[in-house]
Amino acid sequence: MTPTRILIVSWEYPPLIEGGLARHVRKLSEALVDLGVEVHVLTRGGDQATIEEEMAGVLIHRIVEPKRPTDLAEFVTWVERMNSDMLAAGVDLGDRFEFDLVHGHDWLVASACDHLARRYDAPLVTTIHATEWGRHQGWVEDHPQSHIHGVEKWIANRSDRVIACSHFMREQIADIFSVEEGGISVIPNGIDPDDLPAEDPLELARLRSEFAGPDENLVLLIGRLVYEKGFQLALEAMPRVIEALPNTRFLVAGSGTHEAELHKQAEDQGLMSHGKFLGWIGDDVLHSLYRIADLTVVPSIYEPFGLVALEAMASECPCIAADTGGLREVVPLEGAGLRFRASDPEHLAEAAIQVLGDDELAHRMVEEGLAHIRKFDWSDVARQTLDLYRSIAPVAGQA
């Protein structure tokens, strides 16, 4: 049987990592290769010349990206130019390879994906990882939010099938984009514990000593520092946690548009003597932080899935999460994790105090978390994705 040949289009792919999307596309691509699929990825290459390379069996084609503006309104124009460059590169690829299907990720590559699928006469699948409507709690009337929302609605309705990472996201996509739920497949994100290896215990002890003493609790807030991730709620809860457990410290790891406001909030609350902001850090250190923390808090206001929660569980760190969005499908009410009422700092504080003050509960959460993450194996994710491909694009060797 001739393997299915697909083109995946993504605005990021390791080593260029802006967020969780790059890691998702890499793991999905590699898992599809393991199933016998020939996977080509069209993505950015920074300021390098256009290059082609093979990584873990995935054939990667990178374009030179235009210089990115800092102004959000100008970012839309930048995206349009990037899509034009991706389209040109994709046309050349189509002259060399016959693709059975195009799979795009989010609005950032929508235009290129739509044109390439039409040119190849191939079905188009789009994974929508998050929506502008959700990120801004429905406020999408002004530019550039209105433009991004429009592109998302357009590509959702142009695609032969849409993939959502949770049932929560399927309902949102169907509702705000007027897409039939039958045209939306729910395939969760995956987690690979091997991507989060345990470091040398001595090195972990050294790293922890930078942020907390042997008898102190360390609370971890990790991810993109943007409003919808809700870190402001976690900081609001910290004084109560510290009052109940004075030996508690916190660590904020990540960067984003809300970073300066979070710094100011922590200073205004007198918290800076109890914690630290690390800013952006590389994956190696980032993954080690789970191992040295006593608790990871995921306080999102809007969360399509909740990968941070799974990463914490895979790293043997107890996790509490907001009872909202995709987190409801990732974090159990009890056992592997605990959920608190979304946007409720008081309830967040209660949950944190409960876990930090009960070693037996924390140990049980770790054990059950390791079992829970097996439900999100990348091999299963890839099989579900390949079944979807074959349902809309019969390929050589398939009846």
Image (cartoon, grey):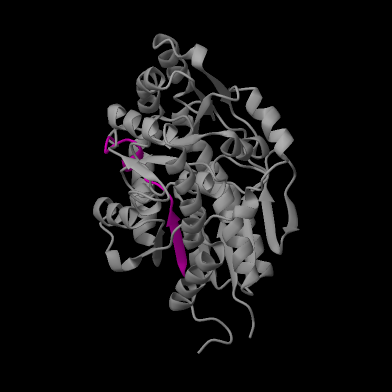
Magenta segment boundaries in residue numbering: 121-139
Left or right, 152 with reference to 174:
right
Q: Residue furthest front?
A: 360
Q: Is residue 218 above or below residue 365?
A: above
* Nearest to the observer: residue 137 or residue 99: 137
Q: Is residue 79 shown to the viewer in this render?
A: yes
* x and y, in percent, of residue 141 in the image: 27, 35
Q: Quadrant for residue 360, please give it.
A: top left
Where the N terminus falls, by quadrant?
bottom right
Left or right, 42 with reference to 377:
right
* Nearest to the observer: residue 79 or residue 266: 266
Q: Is residue 91 shown to the viewer in this render?
A: no
Q: How many marks?
A: 0
Q: Is residue 12 above or below residue 56?
A: above
* x and y, in percent, of residue 56 in the image: 71, 61
Q: Is residue 2 magenta?
A: no
* Nearest to the observer: residue 30 or residue 235: 235
Q: Quadrant for residue 238, please give it.
A: top left
Q: Residue furthest bottom?
A: 399
* x and y, in percent, of residue 68 in the image: 58, 32
Q: Is residue 136 magenta?
A: yes
Q: Is residue 381 above or below residue 390?
A: above
Q: Quadrant for residue 340, please give it.
A: top left
Residue found at x 62% / y 37%: 66
Residue found at x 33% / y 36%: 301
* x and y, in percent, of residue 142 in the image: 31, 32
